[in-house]
């Protein structure tokens, strides 16, 4: 199959020596037979590629990406982390900003990249299709603007994924039917490859070939469906310089932690001389829930290009392994997230809201739904698993929220009464859970006036056991001003908030049995999805949406929908 990516570049703007381009891509959604772990599966792909093709752009560019759906599934594509200023129609979550692109239909995603540079990613945002439909978004800084760190010799995307030997759509549909936890993946992958530690997979190993004494920029993306991951390279130190396409104060670490939805640029300095060893890179989960999970390990190889003289002896070199934190090492996770700080420099300031207009307190966690009368369910005590925010388990509407809002036809689609805080206060992280674990199902959204400064505290619950939840907010970056364990204390915890150089990002882990406080300016009109990026929790309802109203000025209003916007 010919590669169908057509990249035409047309000049759109010229000011000074800075060029702003329009970049055209074509994404053909098509099936492809792919073999991993000796299992061949027909998977949904973009242009027959797995992982999908990279989008490469420069800060300020406009992207026009035409998506043609040639498969029997409905699909949408989300440009994860892209701010989508006033262009919410291009954000992508199905039934939130658009109806799905149905079989045989096309839709052009049209947006600009404003004030962002680094690594983001794109993925399907319909059911569990993102398990195979994902790829990098590489955003170079404006021309002639250097990185605030050493210029790398080479840049390499490292995308983690999860491989399933069976159809992921069947897995989630079976789980929703039985009420139990879904089957876990069969392997983790680096750039689609599982590596040496799985049966029948050693040829499918990602190899990073390097030269001694150079600096490499690894653009790391966690595209796994349901698992946070630790990542390390034997005998090498990584320097984190950016997360979620925002520069951070550089820090060195042997291991990084990355949740689904998160991205990070790290520098890898190779050894000055050709070493007498080969090095494994490894990733495996950080898992805090009580359910079963895929506890396997993906490997890749860091290989030094050998000097000619040594060529014959390279095969015999010893293979060194990194040591990774324990699967449940929350102490490491906490230390790691505390190291992440914004640059907060004159060139890259941290514009943290100092005063707050709107305070919100949301509980996040698992709960249950009753089993149908004539059914036996496999969730807790014969119930069905559910998940909620403030005990509201989000019910997906049958038309897109943004369309309903824009056309003034929200009645029967959503209610603008999402709770500011839980209706029922209890010991959120106590060891004795409440006797009623049932959630409410509803399609409720929270309305924000334009430019409101928002503080949101998200509190994990222990109702069905504590668990880390990577919460992702569409349409915004936010500052992570505080986090802690136990129940959030509104009197004392804010005293320790970091309003100077907190990390700015789009996906943050709510600590297991703890809380996280974020702040942002609601400066982007539209309907913005917020959800756990563990796909199983999203399927169970751990999601909601914000409606940010238009501002008064003409440039503070959501633009009208494009004419090809899909209909439900
Ligand atoms: C995948 O393989 C099956 C069985 O060999 C074949 O019938 C099918 O056409 C293939 N699909 C694609 C997309 O190549
Ligand atoms: C993309 O969106 C911009 C801003 O709304 C609009 O001016 C332009 O015509 C659109 N381009 C296409 C090809 O739809
Ligand atoms: C999930 O795993 C169970 C047990 O191995 C198996 O019986 C079932 O068919 C699997 N479901 C799907 C959808 O693959
Ligand atoms: C790798 O690290 C181990 C443990 O720190 C050390 O003993 C060994 O010498 C290192 N090997 C290389 C080739 O760097
Ligand atoms: C992974 O889980 C399996 C089954 O639950 C268990 O037998 C195995 O020991 C675990 N492996 C590791 C490395 O924890
Ligand atoms: C982590 O897991 C180990 C066993 O794998 C267990 O002994 C330990 O108590 C666990 N730690 C926490 C904090 O849950
Ligand atoms: C349960 O009952 C409903 C209606 O009473 C019926 O539609 C459904 O097929 C039944 N499900 C099973 C598994 O028997
Ligand atoms: C399940 O039932 C047992 C025994 O009645 C009870 O102790 C436990 O809390 C229940 N769990 C849930 C999740 O409802
Ligand atoms: C909540 O539960 C935890 C663990 O059971 C306990 O240590 C704590 O004191 C409780 N907090 C309150 C306010 O009851
Ligand atoms: C929950 O259980 C406690 C003690 O087991 C009981 O006192 C309380 O009334 C129960 N609450 C509800 C709402 O059933
Ligand atoms: C929520 O929806 C489920 C079906 O998804 C249903 O079984 C349950 O009764 C509903 N719960 C409430 C409180 O309405
Ligand atoms: C695809 O989306 C349309 C519009 O929402 C819906 O009517 C249809 O049932 C969906 N089909 C599938 C297979 O999900
Ligand atoms: Cu979650």
Image (cartoon, grey):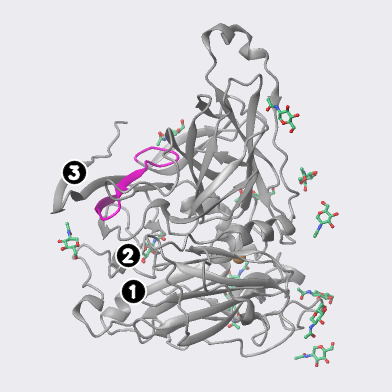
From the viewer's perspective, tell me whether residue 461 is left or right of residue 127.
right
The numbered mark at residue 548 is: none
Q: Earlier in the sequence, mark 3 or mark 1?
A: 3
> Disc 2 designates what residue?
84
Camera-side residue of 130 and 356? 356
Q: Which residues are magenta?
A: 47-69
Percent of width and height locating residue 549:
32, 82
> Disc 1 designates what residue?
524
Q: Is there a contact, CB below 8 Å, between mark 3 and mark 1?
A: no
Q: Is there a contact, CB below 8 Å, between mark 2 and mark 1?
A: yes
Q: Which picture quadrant has residue 412?
A: bottom left
Which residue is pictured at 53% across the width and 13% down the height?
307
Is residue 175 covered in magenta? Answer: no
> Disc 3 designates what residue?
9
Crowd rating for badge 2 (residues with CA inside 10 Å; few <14, some 14–19, many 20+)? many
- Work out whether residue 163 can be spotted: no
């Amino acid at each position: 199959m010919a590669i169908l990516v057509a990249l035409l570049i047309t000049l759109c703007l010229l000011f000074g020596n800075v060029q702003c381009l329009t970049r055209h891509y074509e994404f053909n959604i098509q099936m492809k037979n792919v073999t991993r772990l000796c299992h061949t599966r027909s998977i949904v792909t973009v242009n027959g590629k797995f992982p999908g093709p990279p989008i490469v752009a420069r800060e300020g560019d406009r992207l026009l990406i035409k998506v043609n759906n040639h498969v029997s599934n409905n699909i949408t594509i989300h440009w994860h982390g892209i701010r989508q200023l006033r262009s919410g129609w291009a954000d992508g979550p199905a039934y939130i900003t658009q109806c799905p692109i149905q079989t045989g239909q096309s839709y052009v995603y049209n947006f600009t990249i404003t004030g962002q540079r680094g690594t983001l990613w794109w993925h399907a945002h319909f059911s569990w299709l993102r398990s195979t439909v994902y790829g990098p978004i590489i955003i170079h800084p404006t021309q002639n603007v250097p990185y605030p760190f050493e210029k790398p010799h080479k840049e390499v995307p490292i995308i983690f994924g999860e491989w399933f030997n069976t159809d992921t759509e069947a897995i989630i549909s079976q789980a929703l039917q039985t009420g139990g936890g879904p089957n876990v993946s069969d392997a983790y992958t680096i750039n689609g490859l599982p590596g040496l530690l799985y049966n029948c997979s050693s040829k499918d190993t990602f190899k990073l070939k390097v030269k001694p004494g150079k600096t490499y920029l690894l653009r790391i993306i966690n595209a796994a469906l349901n698992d946070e991951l630790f990542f390390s390279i034997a005998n090498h130190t990584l320097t984190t310089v950016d997360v979620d396409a925002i520069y951070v104060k550089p820090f060195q670490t042997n291991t990084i932690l990355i949740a689904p939805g998160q991205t990070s640029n790290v520098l890898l300095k190779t050894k000055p001389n050709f070493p007498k060893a080969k090095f494994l890179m490894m990733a495996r989960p950080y898992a805090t829930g009580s359910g079963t999970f895929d506890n396997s390990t993906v490997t890749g190889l860091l290989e030094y290009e050998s000097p000619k003289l040594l060529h014959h002896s390279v095969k015999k070199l010893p293979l060194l392994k990194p040591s990774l934190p324990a699967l449940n090492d929350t102490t490491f996770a906490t230390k790691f997230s505390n190291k992440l700080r914004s640059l907060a420099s004159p060139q890259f300031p941290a514009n943290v809201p100092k005063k707050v207009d709107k305070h919100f307190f949301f509980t996040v966690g698992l709960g249950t739904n009753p089993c149908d009368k004539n059914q036996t369910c496999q969730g807790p005590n014969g119930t069905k698993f559910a998940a909620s925010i403030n005990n509201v388990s989000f019910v997906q509407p049958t038309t897109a929220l943004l369309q309903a809002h824009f056309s003034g036809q929200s009645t029967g689609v959503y209610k603008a009464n999402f709770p500011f805080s839980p209706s029922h206060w209890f010991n959120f992280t106590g060891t004795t859970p409440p006797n009623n674990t049932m959630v409410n199902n509803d399609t409720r959204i929270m309305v924000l006036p334009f430019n409101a400064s928002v503080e949101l505290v998200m509190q994990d619950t222990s109702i069905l056991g504590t668990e880390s939840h990577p919460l992702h907010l569409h349409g915004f970056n936010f500052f992570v001003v505080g986090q802690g364990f136990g129940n959030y204390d509104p009197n004392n915890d804010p005293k320790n908030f970091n309003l100077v150089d907190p990390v700015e990002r789009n996906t943050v882990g709510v600590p297991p049995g703890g809380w996280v406080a974020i702040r942002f300016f609601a400066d982007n009109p539209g309907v913005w999805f917020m959800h756990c990026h563990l796909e199983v929790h999203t399927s169970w309802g751990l999601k909601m949406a914000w409606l940010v109203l238009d501002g008064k000025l003409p440039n503070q209003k959501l633009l009208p929908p494009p004419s090809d916007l899909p209909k439900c």
